[in-house]
Image: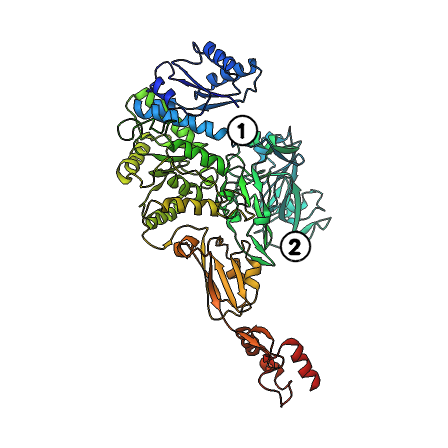
């Protein structure tokens, strides 16, 4: 692929030195610049595209109108109009930083985009068929608004629609109050409770006979739960009144329930709560008949640690998903509804084994972008920008949410262009779908690549997916981990308020300029493979292996404060008590083969493989196993005489009193005797030596037979 980079200063309104920015761009086939690419520079761009036979362009412009011109240019050149990547050198650099920082940052962002090109996934989609049925609960206005395009049912939910001013002629009105809503898009079940059955013919007799108007409704006819019973309920000509109430279940493709509390943090596809506006109506209409959307996830369920053999293990993805797209159909399995997935990455950053991975950006793409942003070495081995004297001093990688947070930063840039006196430190942005995408592996990798700090920049207020301050717990954990590693605290979460740019600048400046010092880990040297053991079946760049690889890279340059690095959730240390009877349960359950029986009465543990899923602890029939989170450096092969395996339990084998064959552990035999010994007392002949439990199965059977 031939790639060309084009740098623009937007009519010299950006604080960017075009020549130095060109010098800072690496690996592409050609770099050109102009003070106004989208106008005077377009002929030059056409010439460069043709002369160098370019297949892809990287262009510095955040402006949509300018982006459209470049796509048109590609179309004219018989190239795909999407064969272009755009870099925000303006709102994200030249308008909010001084010239040296903005120039440095612009070159790094171009290098980031080039690095990302090799990791773009092939297009893939998922679909789900659905009908046009929509239930609206208690909101006649919304029901009327949807009636022209959908098959609408309005559930009264205790209301009377006799006098509403909305056209409900094409709306089916159902009596009853909503008890519960189950299911997913295309398969919702709404459970209703009413005191009037479907035998009602709306003769209005009960409405007229009711002791007061406020205990019944006329449209639809129903009796409210607090209505007093009495003879007035006995005169129904169709016997449609059930004083104790009756329940029924209706099925719909989508649900509009303004008064409901959303049962997931980020809401479910096809389930709408809160005020209904034009955007809600448009969303509902877009899903009528079904949905076809990009496939956001790669799944490799063979390496999933959710459970096995009726035992529950890892619950990370189910707990993390804010949209109800991950469920447990059984206690030992998980299931993904790809059409309900909203591409936030919460399940992928929480999964330790790589069973679920985000397709775009993939972990490998994020790794390459981070490394490109931190690598400032040129082809001759020198530095493109001399640290501390030219360009960016503190190198802070910022994982920036592509939704509200990105919009806030763009707004700050425009305000800076107007005010002329607004700046914030030049963080190095790596765009993610949502900060839910970011987990411990991403942060530890950035530090291993030489970042002085990591800023996670998410939505101000309530995140569209995970609510307010979704990464507070992650920051606390990772600051503990970096402290234990001897790096000090180097991670922070920011939620920029679009209406308060000064607060963001102040908070970021305090973190970058006052709380961080230069990392002892050099930048530009580490290139992640995402692999710890090539023989493992787990995909590359799974969270556990990627994190461990990064920690090892960091340890080459630091003296850790302690042996056990706390705060890393994807690692566990097994301890086994004397209650262990050496049954094969734990080693059979372990999804990463981190436990093995050394012999019939010995158990070994491989800390390097353990993902802290808890299956061994959950499944141990003797409650002999306890699992503590954290990465114990002393148990890694490089600190354990090259041995990955450590013995965690040792016992003795019991030899059969009759034939001498070792057949079980002494602990297991003692355990069985303590539980059932009284029930089999006297079953062996009096002359038999010892306990019947000291005989192997064959000899025990013969002994009992002889008796």
Q: Name the one closer to the observer, 313 or 587.
A: 587
Is 441 drawn above or below residue 366 in the view shown?
below
Is 143 drawn above or below residue 210 in the view shown?
above
Q: Where does label 2 land, which residue?
A: 231
Mark 1 nearby-residue class (10 Å; few <14, some 14–19, many ≥20): few
Quadrant containing the C terminus is bottom right
Instruction: Quote the CA–CA distance across marks 2 and 1.
Output: 47 Å
Assign a secondary structure to mark 1: helix
Q: Which mark is residue 337?
A: none
Residue 526 image-quadrant placement = top left
- Say whether residue 91 is visible: yes
* Label 2 vs label 1, nearer the camera: 1
Mark found first going from the N terminus, 2 or 1: 2
User: Is residue 559 rendered to the left or right of residue 660?
Assistant: left
Q: Count the marks: how many?
A: 2
- Say whether residue 469 is visible: no
Q: Name the one closer to the observer, 399 or 43.
A: 43
Residue 10 percent coordinates (x, y): 38, 16
Assign a secondary structure to mark 2: helix
Residue at position x 48%, y 67% from top? 649
Residue 142 percent coordinates (x, y): 57, 33
Mark 2 nearby-residue class (10 Å; few <14, some 14–19, many ≥20): few
Residue at position x 40%, y 13% from top? 36
User: Is residue 19 rendered to the left or right of residue 279?
Assistant: left
Residue 188 percent coordinates (x, y): 63, 43
Residue 702 percent coordinates (x, y): 69, 81
Q: Where does label 1 land, which residue?
A: 278
């Amino acid at each position: 692929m031939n790639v060309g980079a084009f740098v623009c200063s937007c009519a010299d309104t950006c604080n960017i030195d075009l020549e130095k920015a060109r010098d800072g761009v690496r690996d592409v086939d050609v770099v050109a610049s102009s003070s106004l690419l989208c106008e005077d520079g377009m002929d030059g761009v056409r010439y460069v595209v043709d002369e160098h036979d370019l297949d892809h362009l990287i262009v510095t412009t955040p402006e949509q109108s300018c982006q459209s011109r470049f796509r048109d240019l590609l179309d004219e050149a018989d190239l795909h109009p999407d064969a272009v990547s755009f870099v925000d050198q303006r709102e994200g650099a030249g308008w909010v930083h001084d010239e040296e920082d903005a120039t440095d940052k612009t070159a790094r962002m171009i290098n980031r985009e080039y690095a990302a090109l090799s990791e773009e996934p092939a297009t893939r989609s998922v679909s789900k068929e659905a009908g046009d049925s929509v239930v609206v609960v208690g909101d006649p206005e919304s029901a009327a608004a949807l009636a022209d395009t959908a098959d609408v049912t309005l559930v009264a939910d205790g209301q009377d629609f006799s006098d509403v001013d909305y056209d409900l002629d094409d709306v089916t009105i159902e009596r009853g109050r909503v008890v519960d809503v189950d299911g997913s898009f295309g398969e919702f079940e709404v459970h209703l409770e009413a005191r009037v059955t479907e035998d009602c013919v709306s003769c209005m007799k009960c409405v007229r006979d009711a002791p007061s108007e406020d205990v019944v409704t006329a449209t639809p006819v129903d009796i409210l739960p607090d209505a007093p019973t009495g003879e007035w309920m006995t005169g129904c000509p169709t016997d449609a009144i059930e004083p104790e109430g009756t329940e029924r279940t209706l099925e719909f493709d989508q649900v509009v329930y303004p008064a409901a509390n959303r049962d997931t943090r980020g809401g479910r596809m096809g389930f709408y709560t809160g005020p209904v506006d034009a955007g809600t109506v448009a969303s509902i209409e877009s899903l009528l008949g079904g949905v076809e959307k990009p496939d956001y996830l790669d799944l490799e369920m063979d390496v999933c640690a959710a459970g096995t053999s009726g035992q529950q293990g890892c619950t990370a993805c189910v707990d993390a998903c804010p949209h109800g797209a991950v469920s447990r159909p059984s206690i030992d399995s998980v299931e993904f509804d790809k059409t309900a997935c909203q591409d936030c990455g919460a399940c992928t950053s929480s999964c330790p084994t790589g069973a679920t991975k985000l397709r775009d950006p993939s972990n490998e793409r994020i790794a390459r972008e981070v490394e490109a942003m931190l690598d400032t070495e040129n082809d001759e081995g020198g530095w493109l920008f001399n640290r501390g004297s030219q360009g960016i001093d503190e190198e802070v990688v910022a994982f920036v949410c592509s939704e509200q947070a990105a919009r806030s930063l763009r707004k700050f840039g425009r305000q800076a262009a107007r005010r002329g006196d607004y700046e914030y430190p030049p963080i190095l942005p790596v765009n993610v779908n949502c900060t839910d995408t970011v987990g411990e592996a991403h942060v530890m990798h950035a530090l291993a690549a030489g970042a002085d700090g990591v800023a996670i920049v998410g939505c101000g207020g309530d995140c569209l997916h995970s609510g307010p301050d979704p990464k507070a717990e992650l920051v606390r954990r990772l600051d503990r981990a970096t402290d234990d590693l001897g790096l000090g605290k180097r991670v922070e979460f920011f939620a920029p308020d679009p209406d308060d740019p000064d607060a963001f600048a102040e908070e970021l400046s305090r973190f970058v300029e006052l709380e961080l010092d230069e990392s002892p880990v050099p930048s530009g040297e580490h290139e992640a493979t995402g692999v710890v053991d090539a023989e493992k079946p787990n995909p590359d760049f799974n969270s556990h292996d990627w994190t461990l690889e990064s920690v090892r890279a960091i340890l080459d340059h630091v003296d850790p404060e302690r042996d056990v690095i706390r705060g890393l959730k994807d690692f566990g240390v097994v301890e086994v008590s004397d209650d262990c009877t050496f049954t094969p349960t734990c080693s059979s359950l372990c999804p990463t083969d981190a436990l093995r029986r050394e012999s019939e009465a010995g158990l070994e543990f491989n800390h390097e493989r353990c993902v802290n899923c808890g299956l061994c602890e959950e499944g141990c029939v003797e409650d002999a196993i306890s699992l503590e989170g954290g990465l114990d450096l002393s148990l890694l092969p490089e600190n354990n005489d090259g041995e990955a395996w450590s013995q965690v339990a040792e016992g003795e084998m019991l030899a059969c009193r009759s034939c001498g064959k070792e057949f079980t552990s002494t602990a297991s035999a003692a355990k069985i005797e303590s539980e059932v010994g009284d029930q089999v007392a006297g079953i062996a002949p009096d002359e038999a030596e010892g306990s019947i439990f000291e005989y192997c199965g064959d000899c025990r059977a013969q002994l009992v037979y002889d008796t």
